[in-house]
């Protein structure tokens, strides 16, 4: 195992940490663009608290509200324009993964005269790879994506029905202010989807690595078990701050690179889901809940030992040996039951998605990302027929 790891984001974690926003923003700039979603932060008082904290610290503000779930490139263009016009020197993302991702690309777009879509990876050499961005502060209001402490962003192009990502070191937030109190208003369904997203970020690394990585494995299993246990509590009682706190920390470690260090992880389930939500605008993790168990059943046939380990360590499934495919499949069944029990869909029909488009999803996924043999990276790599099989 060989790796380098660097994550420059300063993490300020804990209930009440939103109060530090003004002081921290004042260290980074003079005028902030506050980026928000469709209005939840205004309804639940988070926006007012953020504004008071900034005012108290003498930080001026401009606003870009209305970032949609599955954030669109048109919104990114609009936000970057506001930031330029208003002379903002810092961006504050106050919301879920959508507001955070849009903010990151706005922060880089301020320094780029071309179209921000040029930064998003979409199957050909990128016209522009961002190297400079305004400082970003992320203040997540939903535990799911881990965008608060990573350098990725996922954006949809509504005109071409494409959804894809950019990952660049300049997009690491300068500071992540993670206050679990902000998540107590998240409804049950979004809480459940968040738990599914967290677990899927972890399983993508866990199952797609050919390397022996016992520290990462145990770390991954601990974070999965915590997300499941505390996730169920947070869904049962949204005001359970203790449960919300641990789910939120799990969301950070699931995708800030620690678990992925040293393992050559592909993200096949995410890559397929991004295509599906580009066509259907479904909630990201609702799509994952359908695709991940189906993908697991496909991958377990060749990577049986790892799925046996998953079943044993997460669900206590007894196996006859490392090649016990029945035990591997039982672990996957138990995982799918868990997803159902928290209210996630596990079939496309529940999302109103038409089976007729399955071939198109497979082709579109492979148009965006492929290895030297034209397959989707992962363990095992997936051909077009494999993707179609999983989706069916
Ligand atoms: O838009 P508002 O009104 O804020 O409401 C949102 C939205 O309807 C609501 N919400 C958020 N915080 C709330 C709340 N409602 C009540 N109380 C609160 N405290 O929840 C809904 C979903 O919000 P969204 O930001 O879309 O959700 P999420 O955090 O799951 O982000 C999803 C996006 O992130 C991308 C996904 O593809 C998707 O576009 N991802 C980003 C990643 C990254 N940057 O690393 C990795 C992920 O795998 C993922 O692909
Ligand atoms: Zn995800």
Image (spheres, grey):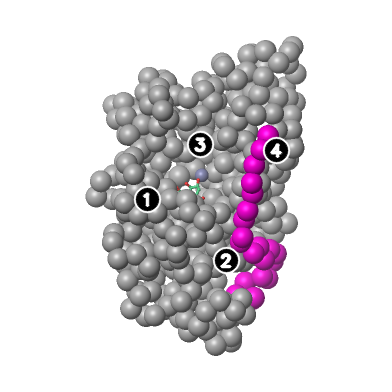
Callout 2: few (<14), some (14-19), or many (20+) C-alpha neighbours within 10 Å? many
Assess whether mark 2 and mark 4 are in contact (beta carbons under 8 angstroms). Answer: no
The answer to which image quadrant residue 23 occupies is bottom right
Q: Is mark 3 within 8 Å of ligand 1?
A: yes
Magenta residues, start to end: 1-21
Residue tagged by mark 4? 216
Question: Marks 3 and 2: CB-CB under 8 Å?
Answer: no
Q: Within 10 Å of the Cα at label 1, are there few (<14), some (14-19), or many (20+) other Cα atoms?
A: many
The location of residue 297, given as percent across then percent down, is 54, 21
Res. 387 visible in picture: no
Q: Nearer the viewer, residue 304 or 109?
A: 109
CA separation in Å, label 4 and label 1: 29 Å
Instruction: Tell me if 147 is positioned left or right of 160 in this view.
Output: right
User: Which residue in the structure is indicated by mark 3?
Assistant: 267
Is 322 located above or below residue 190 in the figure? above
**Cβ–Cβ below 8 Å for labels 4 and 1?**
no
Q: Which residue appears at 67% of the width and 13% of the height? A: 323
Instruction: Name the residue tied to disc 2.
Output: 174
Residue where numbered disc 1 is placed: 120
User: In the image, is 305 to the left or to the right of 142?
Assistant: right
N-term-proximal mark, 3 vs 2:
2
């Amino acid at each position: 195992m060989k790796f380098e790891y660097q994550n420059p984001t300063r993490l300020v974690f804990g209930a009440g940490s939103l109060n530090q926003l003004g002081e921290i923003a004042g260290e980074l700039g003079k005028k902030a663009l506050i980026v928000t979603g469709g209005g939840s932060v205004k309804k639940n008082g988070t926006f007012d608290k953020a504004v008071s904290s900034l005012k108290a610290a003498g930080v001026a503000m401009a606003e870009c509200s209305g970032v949609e779930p599955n954030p669109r490139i048109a919104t990114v263009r609009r936000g970057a324009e506001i930031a330029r016009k208003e002379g903002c020197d810092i961006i504050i993302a106050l919301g879920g993964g959508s507001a955070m991702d849009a903010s990151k690309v706005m922060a880089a777009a301020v320094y780029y005269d071309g179209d921000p879509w040029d930064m998003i990876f979409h199957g050909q050499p990128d016209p522009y790879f961002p190297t400079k961005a305004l400082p970003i502060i992320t203040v997540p209001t939903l535990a799911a994506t881990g965008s608060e402490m990573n350098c990725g962003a996922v954006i949809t192009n509504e005109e071409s029905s494409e959804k894809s990502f950019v990952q660049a070191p300049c997009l690491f937030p300068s500071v992540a202010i993670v206050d679990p109190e902000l998540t107590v208003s998240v409804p049950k369904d979004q809480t459940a989807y968040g738990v599914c997203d967290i677990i899927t970020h972890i399983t993508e690394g866990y199952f797609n690595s050919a390397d022996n990585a016992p520290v990462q494995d145990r770390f991954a299993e601990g974070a999965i078990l915590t997300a499941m246990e505390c996730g169920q509590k947070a869904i049962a009682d949204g005001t359970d701050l203790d449960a919300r706190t641990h789910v939120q920390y799990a969301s950070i470690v699931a995708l800030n690179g620690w678990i992925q260090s040293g393992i050559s992880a592909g993200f096949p389930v995410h890559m397929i889901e991004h295509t599906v939500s580009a066509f259907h605008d479904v909630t990201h993790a609702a799509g994952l809940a359908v695709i991940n168990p189906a993908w697991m059943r496909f991958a377990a046939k060749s990577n049986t030992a790892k799925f046996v380990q998953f079943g044993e360590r997460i669900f206590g499934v007894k196996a006859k040996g490392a090649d016990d495919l029945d035990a591997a499949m039982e672990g996957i069944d138990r995982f799918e039951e868990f997803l159902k029990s928290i209210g996630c869909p596990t079939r496309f029909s529940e999302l109103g998605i038409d089976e007729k488009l399955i071939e198109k999803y497979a082709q579109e996924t492979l148009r965006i990302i492929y290895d030297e043999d034209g397959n989707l990276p992962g363990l095992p790599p997936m051909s077009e027929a494999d993707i179609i099989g999983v989706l069916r």
